[in-house]
Amino acid sequence: MTDELTQNSITTVREFLSALELNALDEAAELLDPDIVWKNSSLPDVRGARRVIGVMRGLEGDRFGFAVDIHHIAAESEQVVLTDRTDYLRFGPVRIAFWVTGTFRLREGRIVLWQDRFSFENFFRGVAVGLFRAVFARDAVQRL
């Protein structure tokens, strides 16, 4: 993985998030620098491309899912991309939606820092809404 990627930084970040949505983890890994650090609000850092992809592989399968709506994306330079987005995590029938601001730093065209900030209040509100929808959607189907 010594070749520098030549696409612009916004394209790299969009392709990375799209690969995660599609569960195309090998493609996502190609966009990461081997020394990446993944930071999430108040959670332990995940260091190294193998570990980041390992965490993602733990969410593979039909019972789990990830999706993203990018509301804003901007490049401060070819090294820094900022995102405002809604992330969706699915655990079985429960779909959790929450707001995320992300900072991606790139080195030689690959993501070396992935830092997401989110409000736990907003996340837990998404959990409550997701649980409510899962329960009532299931009840509606069972009544039919």
Image: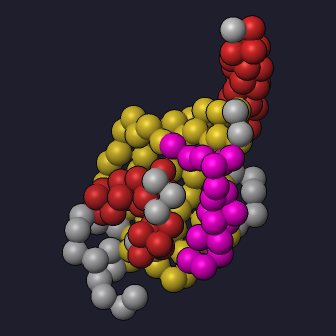
Side of 64 where 26 appears, left or right: left
Residue 62 part of the magenta segment: yes
Q: Position of residue 76 (x, y in %)?
A: 32, 56
Q: Residue at x 62, y 63 (%)?
A: 56
Above or below, 55 relative to 137: below
Q: Position of residue 144 (x, y in %)?
A: 69, 8
Q: Position of residue 23 (x, y in %)?
A: 51, 58
Display coloring: secondary structure
Query: Closest to the observer: 35 or 51?
Result: 51
**Location of residue 19 by image quarter:** bottom left
Side of 124 where 109 appears, left or right: left
Q: Quadrant of the N terminus?
A: bottom left
Q: Which residues are magenta?
A: 47-67
Side of 74 where 101 appears, left or right: right
Q: Position of residue 61 (x, y in %)?
A: 64, 55
Above or below, 43 relative to 68: below
